[in-house]
Amino acid sequence: MPLYFDLHAGRERLALLRRDPHGGQWIEVRTLQGQALGAVAARFLPLGFHWSPDGSTLAFGSNDGRLYLYRPGEAGPQVVFADPALLAGFCEWSADGRRLIFSAFGRAQVAPPNIYCLELDSRQVSQWTNDPGAIDRFPHGSPSGQWAAFQRQFVDEPGVPRRVYLTEGSSGRCFPALDSAEGDTDTGRFCWSPDSAALLITLSRQGRAAEARVVRLQDQAALWSYTSDTLRGAVFSPQGERILCIETGELRWFAYPQGTLLERLPLADYAPLRFDYTGAQVGFAAGANSLYFLGTNFNLYRWKIGGACECLLEENPPARPAYRHETYSVPARDGRPVPVERFIPPAPRRPAILYIHGGPGGAIDPEDPFMLGLLAQGVEFVCTAYRGSSGYGQEHAEANRGEYGRADVWDILAAGFDWKKRTGGERPLVLAGYSYGGFLSLLALAQEQQPWAGGVVMWTVSGMHRMPLHAQRAFPTDAALLAQAKIERSPLAQAGRIRVPLLIFHGALDASATTEEVRAMQASILSQGGACELVIYDDDTHGLVRHRAEIQEAALGFLERFE
């Protein structure tokens, strides 16, 4: 299924990021007419990509922290950035096609990410931001090449809204694009006016309508604005004389700067637009007479502005395994209702899996490849939207503030004990989780009172020291409580308490946990008489997409011991 796309209007070239049945992601390159031009295999771990200004080359980041260039027709991509100390991503071309602007953080995650610039001819790298208290990501270069707009969050000030900042590469100047604390501010692709004098910013305010605002860089004056309760984002047309405002259920096309509503497209017959970290999934045809967008149903649409909208690329999802779906909630230790979903195959095996998604801020994913693969083998899955998860309102998403590794673990335990009660208590329940869900799984497995028969942990986070973005909101602010929390909520400190069989999958290139850390957890478990098997893949990193099929087979074998 297409997860992401980029279109070069002049050459009518389309690049699509697709996901295979095991969760690997690969790039398909084709013309708008459907002619195949090339591909980038899943083994390169490709992420967000963009066409060069002349449409000849794709630049993309990788989950291994490298930056690549790919020219259709060539045998494979070329590495243009590989630094043993830095993990790079979210690269964008400069307007002249001679540079890549990107964000990167230290592999040891001792410092937040900064904005960098790579000169493609010389391969020289310059650092454009360097604030140790700020997390700088998702750069968008100006057409003039002078500026980059980027998102900044503050490590030590979790209450400060997310902000759009500007940096000037030649001088190192760095300042907020909008001097406002009204709420979170964001940009996205197509956020610059063609003359680089103004920036289109989306302002989100909790409990109030969102606003799209064009801000003049010179004095931060508002040149244009639009407010709506359902606004999600906005983009400039390539020529800058139109602005597309993206609502939850409608697209609205305005004249700029006049503000006249020119066209509108209700999305009820199509799908809401997909967004990713870098903004709305949209692209323009030459002359901006057609808009392309990727829907949340993974279909690619073309809207001939002023005319019809058609599905250009319809996704035909693979056959799904049969299962019955149940939804309900259970009370956690403190009484909070915790949403739970069960996926029950027609003839479930005796053992089931309580599956913990990543995050914090992730969501239960009915399309999760690991879950679908084992559902097809008759394994029942129970999924819980622990506090901090998305999809259940802002209050639930914020309910884990100060409670990482404690109250969200309560939610997991509550879902597990409830499932045991619902099923009569005889069937074994295995706890499995990945990324932050692996972190929570390790802590839940270490509890004295727990319902698990065993555990499977995949590409885990070893502790909050590996997640600097969440450092200030994860734990209590009181010094005494903080010191205690750092021990009680550390898988490294608590692993020795795990008494049920555990299977861990880890990539040696993963920066969310080092090989030394996962080996230390295994040693701690074994030293206390526990059972822990550790599988390390030397060539893989966070997500382990190079070995998903092996992991699924090994996990199924692990479950068979509980039949």
Image (tube, rainbow, N blue to C red):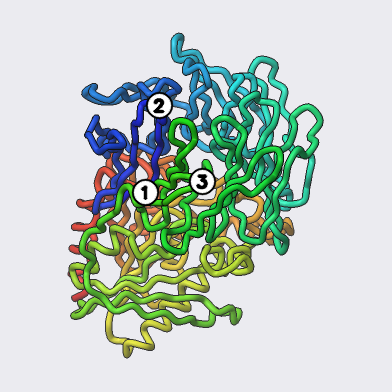
The answer to whether residue 517 shows anywhere in this view is: yes
Looking at the image, the residue that sits furthest to the front is 307
View extreme (top): residue: 122
First-in-chain label (3 vs 2): 2
**Of marks 3 and 1, which one's residue comes earlier in the chain?**
3
**304 and 458: which one is in front?**
304
**Image disc number at residue 300:** 1
Question: Around disc 1, counting alpha carbons within 10 Å, would you say few (fewer than 14), some (14 to 19), or many (20 or more)?
Answer: many
Question: Is the residue 516 above or below the residue 146 in the image?
Answer: below
- Per the image, label 1 sits on a secondary structure element best described as strand
Residue 380 % position (x, y): 28, 74
Q: Quadrant of residue 144?
A: top right
| Residue that numbered label 3 is attached to | 280
> How far, Cα to Cα, is label 2 from label 1?
19 Å
Give the labeled residue for mark 2: 10
Viewer can see residue 519: no
Please, what is the three-letter code of the amino acid marked with disc 2? Gly
Q: Quadrant of the C terminus?
A: bottom left
Q: Distance of mark 3 from mark 1, alpha carbons?
A: 13 Å
Tags 3 and 1 touching, CB below 8 Å:
no
Determine whether the residue tagged by mark 2 lies in a helix, strand or loop: loop
User: Which one is earlier in the sequence, the residue at label 2 or at label 1?
Assistant: 2
Horizontal side of 396 relative to 461 (left or right) equals right
